[in-house]
Structures are given as structure tokens and as C-alpha cells.
Image (cartoon, rainbow, N blue to C red):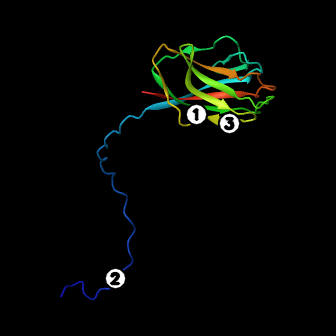
Amino acid sequence: MSWLDGLVKGDTGATGPTGPTGATGATGATGATGASCGELVFMAGDVGTSTTTLYMPPGYIATATSTGKDFAVSRAMTVTGLLYKARVGHVSPSAEQIFFSLRKNGSPESLALLIAEGAMTGDTTGQDPVSFTAGQTIGVQVDKANPGITTSPADASVTLIVTYP
């Protein structure tokens, strides 16, 4: 038997101060670097109504022009898709479509949008990507089927979805 047996237990005392913080654990392994991606936006308030081929610059222009607005890319990249958006769709006499084509080194590529009359959105789902190396030129070309359209889409934009190696 102990001399503590039979003693009455008192109230619990105050909690002591917090102890020092422990050592930081080891750093985990760094993950693999993923491909970086971005968007290039070409936009025109008006893409015209005639069948004349027009060009949209990067950024915004009030009216698409009849002279190319291509520019040289500063690094390798791949355009994986095009997205189209307009505030108001176009009107045509016979349901003509508008073609927005990606340009590479001054020529249209197969990556293109075909926009139906009145449509305000579109994309290139399922089309092959187009790769560029530093110094090659990129742009967006606008074509309309004969006999042209009655009313241009308002504030048409083509966004290029790009990845960088």
C-alpha cells in the first residue's frame, strides 16, 4: 500500500505552455513539367459581306482588311484548335457560310472554322493541330462563299488555342 492511497484527488491544474515547433519534414519530389498553353485572339468588328478574302489581326480591328495581318511567332508552338464567337450572327441570301482559316507562312491551313448563317459560336473539334517553329508567320483568313453575305457578323473573334513545348 502506498502513502497516496486514500488521498482525495484535487482539481486538474492549468495547461502548461505550448512546446517548440518540431523540425520541418523532407520536401517531396518535384512533379513533371507539363506543356504550357495559352490563347491568341484575332478579332474584327466587321468581316465584310463580299467574297473578297479578308484578314483579321491579333487583337482587335474595326474592319477586317484585304492585306495580310500575319505576324512571326517568337517560339515553337502548336495550334490545337480554333474557337469562334460573335455578338450577332451573319445573314446571307442563300444560307452561305463563312470560313475562318488558320494561316501559316501566308497560306491557309486545313485547321478552319465553317460558320453557318446566324451562328454565334463554333469550334474545330476533331481537326488536326498545326505546328509552328520560331519565325514562321501566323494569321487568320476570312472567306465567304459566292454570292457573299448580306450582313457581317458583329464583333467576330477567332481564338487560337495553343500549346508550347
Left or right: 3 as drawn, with respect to 32: left
Quadrant including the C terminus: top left
Query: Callout 2, which amino acid?
Result: Lys
Q: Position of residue 110 (x, y in %)?
A: 55, 25
Residue sitting nearer the eye, 94 or 49 = 94
Give the crowd class for mark 3: few <14, some 14-19, many >=20 residues within 10 Å. Answer: some
Q: Residue at x 31, y 44 (%)?
A: 28
**Label tally:** 3
Q: Do the numbered discs 1 and 3 sit on residues whose CB atoms are within 8 Å? A: no
| Numbered label attached to residue 121 | 3
The answer to whether residue 27 is left or right of residue 71 is left
Percent x, y of residue 101: 61, 23
Question: Where is the N terminus found, in terms of image quarters?
Answer: bottom left
Q: Which residue is mark 2?
A: 9
Instruction: Give the quarter of the image for residue 62.
Output: top right
- Residue denoted by label 1: 124
